[in-house]
Amino acid sequence: MPMEMQDQIMGYDRAATMFSPDGHLLQVEYAEKTVRLGSASIGFVCKDGVVIIADKRMRDKLIISDSSSKIYEIDEHIIASAAGILSDARILIERAQVAGQQHKVVYDSGVDVESVIKEISDLKQQFTQYGGVRPFGVSIMIAGITGEKGRLYVSDVTGNYFEYSASAIGENDEKIKEMLREEYTEGLAIEDAIKLGLKVFKQILGKNFDASRFDVGWIKKEEKKIIKVEGNELKKYSR
């Protein structure tokens, strides 16, 4: 009998705080599987800023597209996306927005990107350690400008976070990252990164690819202002 099945029978998956004999937190691992069921996002650090390309995976034409945006504004110089349970993501995004507002009130300057991802990751870690709660079933990708440098971070279910030049979260994330390792080069411009991201999605999605299903957000180093593009405006990048 596989070890994971034995652990389930013994009840080690009934609480997020209970380690199995082989050292696993099964509820946390289940949450990680939930993240990989979510629609994917790809982020890049570029020579002139940062960009995130997010698959909305909209199937219902009755939904107003603006209400299902997957690019979130944390501050005017920071954007985010998420994969997994998006209602969980909303709580974390709102916590990040409050952290940004508090920093601006206290210090009269924009919060740095790592402080935001650390705030989110600390909360996620707490929900793997205390009884009566479940882990957040979501990975968060945050991109922004700190000083004159573009920064990209990803926080996983456990509360760990890492900085990347380019990364992906959600469905087929490992496959996407393997393609990025082959095709991403430092010094890409934002426009080239958008083209690369959509090219990767086109290879992953095949006949299901449609530029109108994506949200794209970027921030340029000089302007430090969020620009969002979606729908038919993206077709020029996917030719």
Image: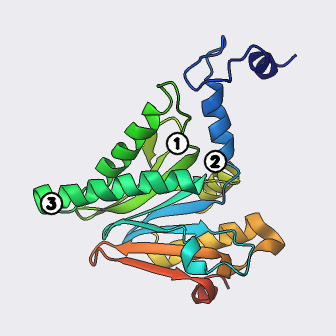
Query: CA gap, disc 1 to disc 3?
Result: 29 Å
Image position of 103 with respect to 56: above or below: above
Please name the residue that numbered disc 3 is placed on: 105
Residue drawn where x is 35% and y is 43% of the image: 118
Picture coordinates of residue 232, whole percent (x, y): 62, 89
Would you say 149 lies left or right of 5 here?
A: left
Pointers 2 and 1 in contact (C-beta within 8 Å): yes
**Secondary-structure class at tag 2:** helix
User: What residue appears at the point 80 percent right and 16 percent down from the top-left corner?
Assistant: 6
**In which quadrant is the N terminus drawn?**
top right
- SS for callout 3: helix
Marks 2 and 1, Cα distance to the nearest angstrom?
9 Å
Specify which label sits upstream in the sequence, 3 or 2.
2
Distance Cα–Cα, label 3 vs label 2: 34 Å
**1 or 3: tag closer to the N-terminus:** 3
Crowd class of label 3 (few under 14; some 14 to 19; many from 20; radius 10 Å): few
Q: Which of 182 and 125 is in front in this view?
A: 125
Q: Mark 2 points at which residue?
A: 35
